[in-house]
Amino acid sequence: MAGRGGRRRGGAGQKAGGESAGRVPDDPEAAAREACLRLLASSPRTRAQLADALRRRNIPDDVAEQVLGRFTDVGLIDDEAFARAWVQSRHAGRGLARRALAVELRRRGVADETVNDAVEALEPDQEERTARALVDRKLPGTRGVDPDKRMRRLVGMLARKGYSPGLAFRVVKEALADEGADPDDLPDDPEPLD
């Protein structure tokens, strides 16, 4: 009877799928294909992310490269499409600016040229509209706070999302002025962030 302390399929020291920890699978190509398909079924991945996963599963580099090449050829791996979708999704969902999006894509192993193409698709006016929407959403929660502190908090929020200091400062200053703050009472330059 296998209760809570029962053995996993394959016995002690083996991973699901029959691979021993630290050992090359019996059929590395089949193991690589299976691992890639399983990972891609859960969410889109970059080629670099899949290569890292195969390395952790002790798939030889030449086999991994062959499988990844085949998956790329048939369109299951497409870093350009991944990057474009990532930029649109993360900008719309989290309000991230070009700079933050580029950092995230590079962390996922997307090539610089692909990153640049993807973030350039984000129009500057779209980025500014998103910054304004973020400030508008956060602005009511800062009412009653010292104007300088309020400015720093809002500019800091935009900076953490990758917006340039100039854009962040301008958008926040305009939002505060629209709310009735005297522009002359607002700081001229952004101060160090909280």
Image: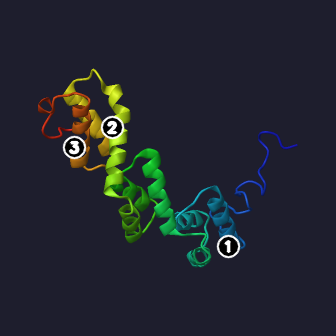
Numbered disc 1: secondary structure: helix
- Residue drawn at point x = 71 percent, y = 72 percent: 30
Residue on which the image places disc 1: 28
Q: CA distance from mark 3 to mark 1?
A: 56 Å
Question: Do the residues under discs 2 and 3 have CB atoms within 8 angstroms?
Answer: no
Q: Residues within 10 Å of mark 2 (few under 14, many from 20)?
A: many
Q: CA distance from mark 2 to mark 1?
A: 51 Å
Q: Quadrant of the N terminus?
A: top right
Q: CA distance from mark 2 to mark 3?
A: 11 Å
Q: Residues within 10 Å of mark 1 (few under 14, many from 20)?
A: some
- Residue drawn at point x = 30 percent, y = 23 percent: 143
- Residue drawn at point x = 63 percent, y = 65 percent: 36
Viewed as shown, does residue 102 lie left or right of 8? left
Viewed as shown, does residue 87 lie left or right of 77? left
Q: Residue furthest right?
A: 1
Q: Is residue 193 visible?
A: no
* Residue 100 tag number: none
Q: Quadrant of residue 149?
A: top left
Of pointers 2 and 3, the one earlier in the residue sequence = 2
The location of residue 75, given as percent across then percent down, is 59, 73
Q: Quadrant of the C terminus?
A: top left
The location of residue 126, given as percent across then percent down, is 36, 52
Residue on which the image places disc 3: 170
User: Looking at the image, is 35 positioned above or below residue 9?
Assistant: below
Numbered circles on residues, count: 3
* Residue 135 tag number: 2
- Residue drawn at point x = 34 percent, y = 47 percent: 129
Q: Quadrant of residue 156?
A: top left
Of pointers 3 and 1, the one earlier in the residue sequence = 1
Looking at the image, which is closer to me, 116 or 177? 177
